[in-house]
């Protein structure tokens, strides 16, 4: 009696999201559960982890995850080439507008609105020199 090889079990499918490599800008599809990945184009590390800062830390954060800085938290080391970052953001936005493909947009309308509220609150806190509390 001939034996047939057992079928290989199907690989689990994970829900994906699209991110871009910080170094070369390549578009990467990564599982939502992933904490990091490697760029398939330039082999650089891409951080996907979420961070919560509850005290003073000296760290450069460069992640596609969420960065939450609590009221008593602060970061002492943050460097970014603003010109390159804005060039990249503008290029991605213009590509989305020209193609009509908004799948690479990392957030929905509600997230965008929450980000705007946070940005305006930070600006207000800096201008006034006091902590600002955001309420729902």
Image (cartoon, grey):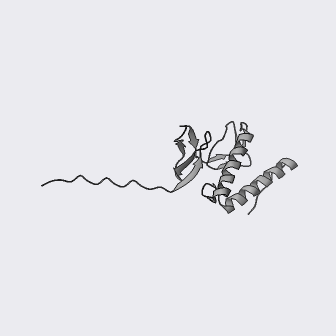
Number of dots carrying numbers: 0
Foreground of the two, 135 or 39: 39
Residue positioned most to the right: 128
Percent across and percent down for residue 79 are 71, 37
Q: Is residue 124 visible?
A: yes
**Which residue is found at the position 39% from the left and 53% from the top?**
11
Image location (x, y in percent) of residue 24: 61, 40
* Residue ID at (72%, 60%): 113
Quadrant in which the C terminus appears? bottom right
Residue 34 as seen in the image, left or right of residue 60: left
Can residue 129 be seen at all in this image of the molecule? no
The percent position of residue 114, horizontal first and vertical second, equals 71, 58
Q: Position of residue 132 (x, y in %)?
A: 80, 53
Quadrant where the N terminus is found in the figure = bottom left
Residue furthest left in the image:
1
Q: Nearer the viewer, residue 98 or 135?
A: 98
Side of 15 where 60 appears, left or right = right
Q: Outermost residue, front direction?
A: 98
The residue located at (65%, 53%) in the rendering is 95
| Residue for point 52% across, 50% down | 30
């Amino acid at each position: 009696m001939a034996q047939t090889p057992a079928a290989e079990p199907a690989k689990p499918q994970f829900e994906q999201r699209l991110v871009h490599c910080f170094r070369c800008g390549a578009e990467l599809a990564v599982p939502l559960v992933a904490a990091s990945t490697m760029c398939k184009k330039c082999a650089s590390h891409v951080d996907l982890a979420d961070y919560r800062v509850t005290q003073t830390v000296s760290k450069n954060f460069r992640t596609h995850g969420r960065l939450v800085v609590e009221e008593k938290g602060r970061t002492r080391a943050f460097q970014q080439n603003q010109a390159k970052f804005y060039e990249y953001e503008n290029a991605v936005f213009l590509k989305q507008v020209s193609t009509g493909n908004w799948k690479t947009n990392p957030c929905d309308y509600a997230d965008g609105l929450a980000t705007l509220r946070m940005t305006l609150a930070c600006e207000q806190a800096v201008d006034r020199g006091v902590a600002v509390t955001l309420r729902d």
